[in-house]
Amino acid sequence: MSKEIIINADMAEEVRIAIVENGRLVDLDIETQKRAKHKSNIYKGIVSNIEDSLEAVFVDFGDEKQGFLPLSEIRPDLIPESCRNSKKVRPSEILSRGQEIVVQVTKDEIGNKGAALSTYLSLPGRYVVLMHSDEGGGGISRKIDNESARQAARDMLTRLSVPEGMAVIIRTAGMTANRQDLYRDFKNLCETWQQINRGAELGRAPTLLYREPDIVVRTLRDYFSNDVSKVVIDDDEEFEEVSNYLTQHMPGLVQILEQHKKKDPIFFHYGIEKAIEDLFERQVKLPSGGYVVIEQTEALVSVDVNSGKSTKEDDHEATVYKTNLEAVQELARQLRLRDLGGIIVIDLIDMISGKHNRDVERALKEAMKNDKARIKIGRIGENGTLELTRQRLRQSHRLISHVTCKQCEGTGRVRDSSGLAILALRNIYGHLSKRHHHLSLLTVKMPVDVANQLNNSKRRELVDIGERYQVQLHILGDARLMGDELDFLEERRGQAGLDAASTQPKVSQKPHRNALRMPPPSIGPAPTLIDFDETLDESEEPIELERPIVEEHFEDPLMEAFFGHAPELQASLGMEFQEPDSVDETQLASKPKRRRRRFARSRRPKSEVTS
């Protein structure tokens, strides 16, 4: 099996590492500057809150959100002697608010959940892992199942001088390392441990004591094995750093390091870019024509297997059996690529044969044996579902690179304009039922399609509302608003101008572009008109009503630019702009002036006013 590690580090904002086996993408890790990872970092924190009901402690370790430290992750040596014999110990009996404590991040924050913490510290190296242990000694990776290899690992452990209160675990890569490399790795971890202890004694909480290496060094440390044929990097600076790391820790493997110098981008060259885009699709196709649908929710990950167009086999059972085998093999790859964790429920196609069920279970276990996450696989039940749990190693790529849709708020569906129009009508009813006593005019802004629906199909209902509450209604479409967002603007009786309603269901705060204003229907009682008497009283000076000067305004920026700067814009478009012919001032003076029409309010003499 040929394995390659492809590193795309030409952009400082995002580093991507792909592991390719036999030309197929099997693992992907992405690290961005926007979402820095804290997992495996060690901090000196301060206990900020203690919740005995949750059996947990909240710790301020310097991040925006407080970390969550469960009671089960507090080491026994931190428990006071007076409480060690108790059957049930509460967190408040172990720690106190304001107390300093050294913790390690075991899981990065996800959504509203803060990072998970532990007091069981561990330092992973290339060949061994150094960790806290009351019993001392060490252990061997569970992935090493050969008994003779495990016995050889035990012999190596006896030759290491493990510090008191510590333990050493030999990793799978340590089985192929010589004693000199293994001892060098162990010595480096012990020196790092001493630096952490000195920082914990002198540092002021909250502070960082140990930072996990970057994504490139981490990948080489955890994924590098003898079956890796080459490591390719496209960035000069990162290439030098990796070269130095291999020279120091794995000098015999420097020759497989290559630098990508071809014109096409590295992920396009190796055909990885298209495979990454497919990771964000719900549906994954299978070779025989079937497909699986992967849905990630808050509670679990659901996987639905469908036969699709898979009809190559002679009978239905054979077709279903083959589709299920392909599905579990592809699913093992997808779970690793997408890093989906927690509870995973697979809805397989029902099979009659019990032997086929056992074959599918074995195929899934075999496909997931190279996954570094801890996995527990159940059995296929009577209803054809298989449940498994998988450790989440990092945030899924969808959470890192995607945001929640503002239109559907993550549900994946939105209400149609007819339903939104009815909802808007009900909200208008509810708004006026409480506030109509003081209103003369209510302007309601809503999404353009909803306003169209109301003005066209609900015009009669709008008229009825206006007549019922004796309020004039204006319905306006606003391109800034989406979904069920409404904006109420009120004009009180005897008050000019519109005021924003004090109770608004939702008000969009997006930057305004061009709001589509629709002509309001004539709804509600007609406004009171002022009568003018055209007969002028000679004793009074008439009131002249000047026509207001209206500055022409274009909401479209292109129209504004064209008409506001016609000569310059037309010249840039290759159009000839002609100035108007000059006009003689005498000709202007000779033209008759249009006489303004004067209106005056009829006023009674003061003597005629009766009390």
Image (cartoon, grey):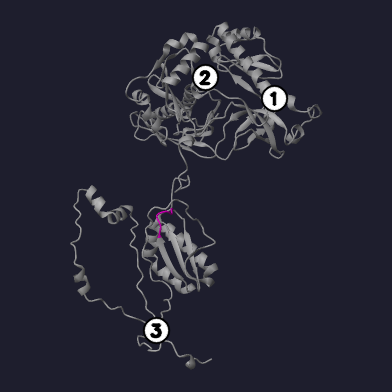
| Residue 468 against residue 284 in the figure, above or below | below
Residue type at mark 3 is: Glu
In this rendered view, identify the residue nearer to me: 393 or 359: 393
- Is residue 56 among what the camera can see? no
3D distance between C-alphas at marks 2 and 3: 96 Å
Tell me the quadrant of the picture where the N terminus can be found: top left
The answer to which image quadrant residue 58 occupies is top right
- Is residue 264 among what the camera can see? yes
Q: Which residue is mark 2?
A: 222
Local crowd at mark 1 within 10 Å, few (<14), some, or many (≥20)?
few
In this rendered view, identify the residue nearer to me: 441 or 386: 441
Residue 139 percent across, percent down from the top left: 63, 15
Q: Which residue is mark 1?
A: 202
Residue bounds of the magenta highlight = 477-482
Look at the numbered discs 2 and 1 and tell me whether their residues touch, using CB distance below 8 Å.
no
Q: Which residue is mark 3?
A: 541
